[in-house]
Image (cartoon, helix red, strand yellow):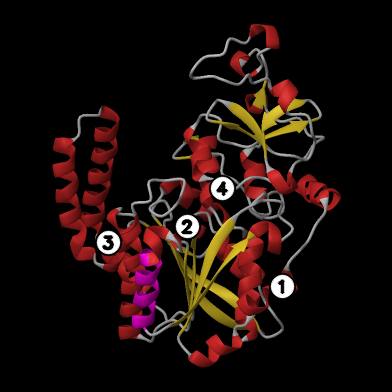
Amino acid sequence: MKTKIKVGSLFAGVGGICLGLQQAENEKYQFDLAWANEIDEYACETYRTNFNHTLIEGDINLVLSPSLVPVKIKDLEEKLLETEKKSEQTKIKANIQKLKKNLEEKYYEKMHEIILSCRIDLLNAGFPCQAFSIAGEQKGFDDERGNLFLSIVELIRQLGEKYEKPRFLFLENVKNLKSHDKGNTYRVIKSKLEESGYVIKEHILNTMDYSDLPQNRERIYILGFLNKEDADKFTLFENLKEYVKKKNSLERAEDVKKVIDYNEIADNKYYYTKQKYPHYFIEEDEFVPSEKKTERINLGEDIKEFYQFYQIRRGMYVRKNKSDVCPTLTANMGTGGHNVPLILVRDGIRKMTPSETFKMQGFPIGNGYVLPKKINGKDYGDANLYKQAGNAVSVPIIKLIAEHILTLL
């Protein structure tokens, strides 16, 4: 029987890090997921559909400090008075109602007990990246989401007081975290982790360089080691050249075929036709240049190659992605517009389906990983699935790093 390495997962999303850890094993050891935490109810539904261990749904700061629930309710009530948008008011009211119910049922006290109920060997966290992402406003620690990093430090402290600190930390974020605010943001993060007792190693890896997934996706992976001996033994980042996968166009096309089923006819809603989007199929004699539109778009002319990925940029022009791979999948695929990459298939031009975006991240759709169809009795919309895929990690990269952690044992 293999020795199990206990894992706790913060900001678990739809379980990309958890899945990569599950897939990693050797002759003696395997990772065992003790609990996971996520606040987004849609992501929680996807997670529950695919994992059977404890999922703690809610704000991690309230889980770690249940006494803050009344303070949070008061803050939301004040925000409600200041907000004029009805849609925002409805959302705030729902949050207040849910928190009041949680307070009555002592939900966060119970979750606090669960999260501290066992010693964990590895703590992972794909902490919110929007505050640092070049796709966002880059507010960093001035953004409430940016400060959620500190909850990782607080959990380490609480675990250390009750048992001992996790032997390993495994964190993931956007590439821009390293350079944000001229490097000051990452210096603060690294110093906080070092003050918690960890030796830190980090590296930026591109999914297309170290896996068979045809996606250009650069992310920073941060490893923390409580023992210097473990840190010295972990040499993956120093020897990455051994793991680079150099591929030509034909090999990339084969990888794309594993993600996109070119023979399957997708739902009509994913296709681009002149009837649905006449302004994206403009003939030369129909085009009238203006200040806002200097280039003519005709998807039938612009999208000509199979096994390639295209994007409509700002509604102004069409761009084919470089290196024969998919562009970085982003959370704003779920915000409407035309943010989902486009492809040419046998029966026309369409955007990638939610299932394909998950497969592009390495989730085994159709082979053990399932996307939910309903939530709270209602249809589970594509927008949330696109957002989840964009926020997720590339599973094979997690597996690669996790396997090297296991070799230390």
Which quadrant would residue 297 be assigned to in this image?
Answer: top right
Q: Amino acid at mark 4?
A: Ala
> Is label 1 in contact with label 2 (beta carbons under 8 Å)?
no
From this viewpoint, which residue is outermost toward the top?
285
Label whose residue precedes the other's in the sequence (2 or 4): 2
Q: Secondary structure at mark 1?
A: helix
Residue 189 lies in the magenta-colored region:
yes
Q: Amino acid at mark 2?
A: Asn
Q: Amino acid at mark 3?
A: Leu
Q: Which residue is mark 2?
A: 176
- Find residue 32 and report its horizontal and vertical position in percent: 56, 74
Q: Which residue is mark 1?
A: 241
Could you classify mark 2 by the number of other residues whose Cα lies within 10 Å: few (under 14), some (14-19), or many (20 or more)?
Answer: many
- Find residue 308 and report its horizontal and vertical position in percent: 74, 39
Could you classify mark 4 by the number of other residues whose Cα lies within 10 Å: few (under 14), some (14-19), or many (20 or more)?
Answer: many
Q: Main secondary structure of the magenta part?
A: helix
- Find residue 315 and report its horizontal and vertical position in percent: 54, 26
Q: Quadrant of the C terminus?
A: bottom right
Of circles 2 and 3, the one toward us is 2
Q: Which residue is mark 4?
A: 389
Residue depicted at 54% across the width and 19% down the height? 293
Label whose residue precedes the other's in the sequence (1 or 3): 3
Q: Secondary structure at mark 3?
A: helix
> Is label 2 in contact with label 3 (beta carbons under 8 Å)?
no
Of circles 4 and 3, the one toward us is 4
- Measured in 3D between alpha carbons, the distance from the residue under mark 4 to the one under mark 3, in whole angstroms, is 26 Å
Q: Nearer the viewer, residue 241 or 35?
A: 241
Mark number displayed over residue 62: 3
Q: Secondary structure at mark 4?
A: helix
From this viewpoint, which residue is outermost toward the bottom?
229
